[in-house]
Amino acid sequence: MIGRIVSFGRRGCEVLEALGRAGQFLAQSAVGIPSREGWYLWLRQVHFVGVLSLAIVLVSGLFIGMVLALQGYTLLVDFGAEQALGQMVALSLLRELSPVVAALLFAGRAGSALTAEIGLMKATEQLTSMEMIGVDPLRRVVAPRLWAGFVALPVLTVGFSVVGIYGGYLVGVEWLGVFEGSYWGNMQGSVDFIGDVGNGMVKSVVFALVVTWIAVFQGYDLVPTSEGISRATTRTVVYSSLAVLGLDFVLTALMFGGFS
Amino acid sequence: MIESPFVVVEGLHFSRGEKDIFRGVELQIPRGQITAILGPSGTGKTTLLKLIGGQLIPDAGCIRIDGEDVHALPRKALFRLRRRMGMLFQSGALFSDLSVFENVAFPLRVHTDLPEAMIRDVALMKLQAVGLRGARDLMPSELSGGMARRVALARAIALDPELILYDEPFVGQDPISKGVLVQLIKRLNDALGLTAIVVSHDIQETLSIADYVYVISDGRVMAQGTPDSLDVDEDPRVSQFVHGEPDGPVPFHYPATDFFSDILNGEGRP
């Protein structure tokens, strides 16, 4: 019994210690104005984590919009409310599915790659050699990746929403015959820019910060072996996914749960 | 007592988990000379270089470089100090996304405002010194281990540092490259007056260029002196190590229980 309590306490201390390290890591890497070369490094990372994630995010958005329209239509048509399909697709995407699914895809596609890349740099002593050259790897390696993820995910979320709504249009209007005017008109009438689009974007910005932070920290803090890289990459996807889903509930409760 | 040493290590204690690596190490690295640090495998020679470079923090004691306490410096000041140092890593540690030329040009680009033409000239001069000017466009993945270490050496000397730390510079080098490297380290030291610390297992090569030698074992400095004095040192541990003798007081085996009882009582357990 005592042993269990000791073990539990030790584990708790380790978690708190890791959280402290992660906080310090974020503060050290995120502050400061980037140099001209810093902007170039940031742009390269935007390409790596953002542009290269575009295909998977847009294709997923298209299919999710199409499925939403199909499922929504079969439900709404029973009540003779299929004209509200556009409203249903848009609100589902803007408030929930776009920020959450885009963040989960981003964690799997870009987050795991960031962890593996930084982890391999650590394992091959590239980060250490950078330190010995007098260059801070937190500023040169971590910061551009952190800020690139922070910017890229909200933009990807916008793309996800746009393509998803178009996917809903293809299925609802072009295939199932919902009146085009009511699809767009109901959407326009019911979607509030601040309340729906704005809140969805706030969620996306929070998810971007959390997912990228987890990814770069796991890469930087891992045990520099092949097994360590493998475990850290897995941890990035698991922790990011759980954090996104948990935070989504908290943010939804705050934004739409009537607490405000 | 060395007059005005460049690096001073005082009462250094460092441990990893339960294992004590250093137990009160005292070193004085003379300015403008080549100091060799020798010792059996696992004595923490590379760890010592990382402590000097400020990458690891000692449990007790202090390390001063040119009068500055490495571990008392704030992060920015530590990075400023490191610009005056170069380190050759055992693995080379080249940046895998940059070509050979860009690896060597990297310190020049980040720490100087030199025009591109001059950066090119300096980087090519450094590559010429290590015999790899012709490999400038190769990527690190296309180099052999020995070539990678020579490129890393070119990068380490790109900014003409005042202190250079060599971690096993001769490992994996063919005899020609090894000879060239020995001469290069010596020439750099003579021409630029830089202070060098060489950690190596290649005793003959290292002793041929070292001005002063420390032998570390069991967490302490076991012997020190000039190469000639160590060669005739009567301490059996020093003599065994310097002359590479298989039998002697320095054990080959990692500490373990008796071999026969281990075999007989194992009953299939690892």
Image (cartoon, coloured by chain):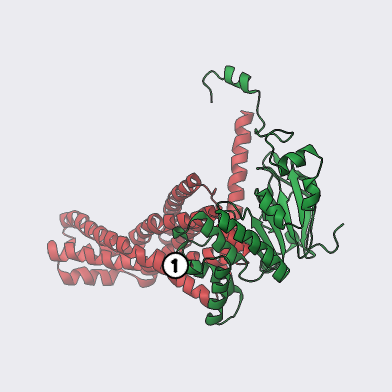
Chain colours: A red, B green
User: Where is mark 1, residue-wise?
Assistant: A45
Question: Is disc 1 surrounded by few (<14), some (14 to 19) or many (20+) residues within 10 Å?
Answer: many
| The one of B198 and A148 positioned closer to us in this rendering | B198
Instruction: Tell me if residue A217 comes above or below residue B31 in the rendering.
Output: above
What x and y, as percent, mark residue A104? 38, 55
Mark 1: secondary structure: helix
Residue at 80% x, 45% y is: B232
Q: Where on the picture, by quarter, is residue A51?
A: bottom left
**Viewer can see residue A28:** no
| The one of B160 and A212 positioned closer to us in this rendering | B160
Instruction: Tell me if residue B201 comes above or below residue A84 in the rendering.
Output: above
- Chain under numbered label 1: A
Residue at 61% x, 65% y is: B156
| The one of A257 and A27 positioned closer to us in this rendering | A27
- Amino acid, disc 1: Gln
The C terminus of chain B is located in which quarter? top right
Residue at 36% x, 72% y is: A193
What x and y, as percent, mark residue B33? 75, 62
